[in-house]
Amino acid sequence: MRTMKDIDLQSADNDPLRAQIFPIDTESISNAQSSSLDSGPEGSPPTSNFTFLSGERSILYHSNRSSNTSLQCIIVINPQCVILGQMCVTNFRIIIEPLEASWCYENKYRMEYFEIPLMMIQRLERPSDKNYCMLDISTKDGRNIRIGVTHQAQHEFNLFTVLYSYTFPQTLVSRFAFLHRDNGPEDGWKIYNFVNDFARIGINPSKPESKWAFLDNSNWEYCETYPQTVVVPKELSSNDIKASANFRSKNRFPALAWANSRNGATLWRCSQPKTGIRTSISRCLEDEVFLRIISKSSARGQGLHIFDARPYMNAHAQRAIGGGVENTSYYEATELHFLGIDNIHIIRESWHGALNSNSVNPFKYLSAFEKSGWLEHISLLLQGSTAITESLQNGTSALIHCSDGWDRTSQLCSIVQILQDPHYRTIRGFAQVIEKDWVSFGHQFDTRLGHANPNSNDEKRSPIFIQFLDCIYQLGCQFPTHFEFNNKFLHDLAEFAHSCRFGTFMCNNMKERVTVNLESRSTSVWTYVFAHLDMYTNPYYQPGQEETITPCFSPRRLQIWHELLSQWQPDYYYPVGLLLGPSDHKEALMKSTYEGMQMYKELIQQRDKEIQELKSQLAKLQGKEAEHLPDIE
């Protein structure tokens, strides 16, 4: 018999990330025990319709070193529902399947609910239990699952220790991405080319008349978290740039991100200046010259707007720890604007609140979600991006920074480009802007997404990239014909960012990627995407819409991204395999209708052709009959 005393609560009630721990109804557990939980026979098949990925293998090894592909287990759905299942554990994921084939369909559970990439797990614990070895699994996308195997199986397979070591590998090269290979029509690592991307918008430093130059940062001489090549003003010397870098946090000096080819206004990114009370430097002449050159670079020469992503009070509070803000009295023709976007800690708590709102009474869901403040943060990002876009459209160059210039700065830079440049609203262009403003410019994917980090309470975690994807989801809702990709594309990018199946969203900067030869040792996510364009193409997309899009950032117009935030809830269950929610259902229906129309068009054309051939044959027969008829006078 099982009681609450058998469970180690470990302050679970106070931890929003911990899998919900509850007493199990004894009758339910007895029903589950009616079938023995033995490990499957050696070589037994894993779950139905299960296919190993390239590089994937079972990690269940018997103490005598023989391998098993699956184990029987119990799945604790809730205190009154405990069912038997079969569990397959590989070096990439856990797959659990209820033994009753129709259980998921009848209870409106997506089969994917029980398929968990190991790197998606943020907490793995083993609560005490007399009868079973229980595993509590909490994932980064809101799943809380409790499974149990016999103590004998735990002893024979050392299940918890093995699973823990693969979930939180101690070395980067131990991750699944270094074993996995995906083939496709394009090599995703070559999707983004720095020189070609800037040439497309009229930035070609190789021309003598160009105002700009390529700065070689391949040995990380200027900044360890920047790309290997950066665009800077041509008239600045190497020492000028180094002085500006030393004046800014993490040496992240102003770097060109994009240019408006119509009016010459340019978009720049950097980190905060080090003007704090703990520093002996209050200004930097080289940095002032740097920004003066930028302010005069547009066709109209209308100055420079500095957009500090932080709230005003937060930005000035940074002076106490060595950061700070620009003193505009030192910078010619500049204006300083604060966008009021909250930091990673606020966003992390908001994300937890948004996910946890799914566990409250359904009638109180909207109230709980509102308390999370998630849509408010989305609104502020869109509002800030719109303000920056207006500046660039009016011919005034813009410089964006937050604290270190790799979180809010990456969000704003990429959204601003997507609003103005229709190329970045295509699948290829969207991949390129992510490669440029997130991967190359050093967003800390490993740290922010908690890759291989067993400390789920790490304060450096924050779903900054996921928040950006939600912003793009909002744009797609408001401008459904302007984006080549659909919602499933955004949803899958969120999953791939966590799962570490591909190398794209691993490491914290380009220096780390080059050090481990990531490009040659893993597959890019874009290789997979371009091999599955039929899944990710928006049937409503109308190419040729060149205008800048201006979103409504009022919370009244924003929508909850249920396909991501509520995807595991029964009321968002869709029995059709690839459909995540209503939006995907509409897209699939539209695509199916279009394909049906094309089929009927081809059928009609074929019938028309056959009719013409029959008419021709009939005409020939009639002609021959006329030749044999006697003339009547």
Image: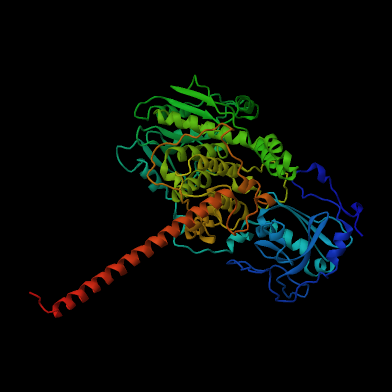
Closest to the observer, 498 or 35: 35
- Vertical position of residue 536 compared to residue 132: above or below: above
Q: Is residue 299 left or right of residue 526?
A: left
Q: In which quarter of the image is the C terminus?
A: bottom left
Task: Report the residue at 90% width, 55% height from top.
Answer: 6
Residue 247, visible in the rendered structure: no
Closest to the observer, 579 or 293: 579
Q: In this view, does 338 lie to the left or right of 145?
A: left
Residue extending furthest toward the top = 329
Q: Is residue 256 left or right of residue 111?
A: left
Task: Report the residue at 67% width, 65% height from top.
Answer: 90
Closest to the observer, 314 or 427: 427
Q: In which quarter of the image is the N terminus?
A: bottom right
- Vertical position of residue 292 compared to residue 413: above or below: above
| Residue 299 coordinates in the image, percent (x, y) | 34, 29
Task: Report the residue at 84% width, 69% height from top.
Answer: 152
